[in-house]
Image (cartoon, grey):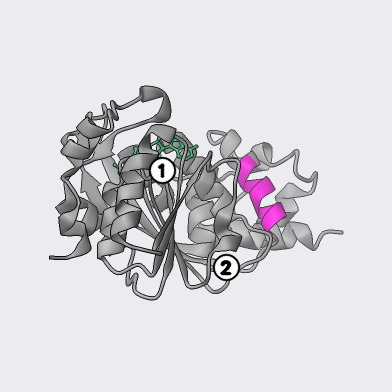
Amino acid sequence: MSAIDKLPPLREVIATHQLSARKSLGQNFLLDLNLTAKIARQAGDLSGCDVLEIGPGPGGLTRGLLSEGARRVLAIEKDQRCLPALAEIAAAYPGQLEVINGDALEIDPLAHLTPPIRIAANLPYNVGTELLVRWLTPKVWPPVWQSLTLMFQREVAERIVAQPGSKAYGRLAILAQWRADARIVMSLPPGAFTPPPKVSSAVVHLTALPEPRFPADAAVLSRIVAAAFNQRRKMLRAALKGVTPAIEEHLNAVGIPPTERAEQVGLEGFCALARSIAGEG
Ligand code: SAM
């Protein structure tokens, strides 16, 4: 019998520790251990990896990560009520699970881990998006993490992997795809969660590229992409006027028609524009 088999079923854990789901913490739990093991497998080969898990809750995904062979899991959970349930898992995997009771938006534990590092989470979607942006914009690239495996609302997942010409295409797609390979690897109906959320969810797996897909200064790229998509219905020559008065020259120089809208321009085009503008002064 493996360590995980000796642990009680998650429904029992929730009843014993009275973990009634709190909406304020975005608590929609995954109780099916086959499903959580499947999600853990989407994170790649975990053997020999340290895994950072955000929001373990009663520990369904945590069990999956450990049973799939993670060397060590460091989990950050805001809800103190979950700690006894997580302590039971830690006892079943001596020395392999450490839990920090805190807010993942306020602490950054990546420095406590030993590479190779993978990150996995089933989080409230607003916290997930904010953390995703932070993980994709470290001071130096490549980052300390190798991959991110994150649950999002289906609509947010589609924005991360969106291609030009679609409504979902915007800042999140460019940010994610500039420095990572991003794929939707699983779709989950509301009924997979307890309690079920209103919308469907999807797991996105992102692998860090050794270097950005196209050269560009991160700050300049971020500025033009923000300006272009803040006014996505406007032509680029108007939407980007505030970035530089010479915007039409730059657009022409890199072969983007100034009458084009942000939605039509691919990642390569935005990077070329960023390089042209950065070379201005
Ligand atoms: N991972 C568990 C699962 O799959 O069953 C729980 C998922 S539930 C959607 C989100 C979890 O994130 C909850 O346990 C909640 O308490 C926790 N959480 C919410 N905001 C957080 C934050 N800012 N930092 C750390 N954990 C947070």
What SS does tag 2 mark? Answer: loop
Question: Looking at the picture, which amino acid does disc 1 mark?
Answer: Gly
Q: Residue furthest left?
A: 1
Ligand 1 positioned in quadrant: top left
Identify the residue at image location x=17%, y=37%.
Answer: 11
Q: Which mark is residue 141?
A: none
Q: Is residue 261 visible?
A: no
Where the C terminus falls, by quadrant?
bottom right
* Residue 222 is a magenta residue: yes
Residue 59 in the image: state x and y as whole percent: 30, 46
The CA distance from mark 1 to mark 2 is 29 Å
Q: Residue 209: x, y in percent?
A: 50, 70
Depth check, mark 1 against mark 2: the one in front is: 1
Instruction: Name the residue tied to disc 1.
Output: 55
**Residue 76 appears left or right of 224:** left
Looking at mark 1, is its residue's CB closer than 8 Å to ligand 1? yes
Q: Residue at x 35, y 67 (%)?
A: 70
Which is the main secondary structure of the residues drawn in magenta?
helix
Above or below for 134 versus 4: above
Residue 89 position, x and y percent, is 30, 52
**Which residues fall within the magenta stretch?**
218-226
Asked whether, in this view, residue 120 is left or right of residue 7, the answer is right
Q: Which mark is residue 212?
A: 2
Inspect this view and state whether residue 154 appears.
yes
Q: Secondary structure at mark 1?
A: loop
Q: Earlier in the sequence, mark 1 or mark 2?
A: 1
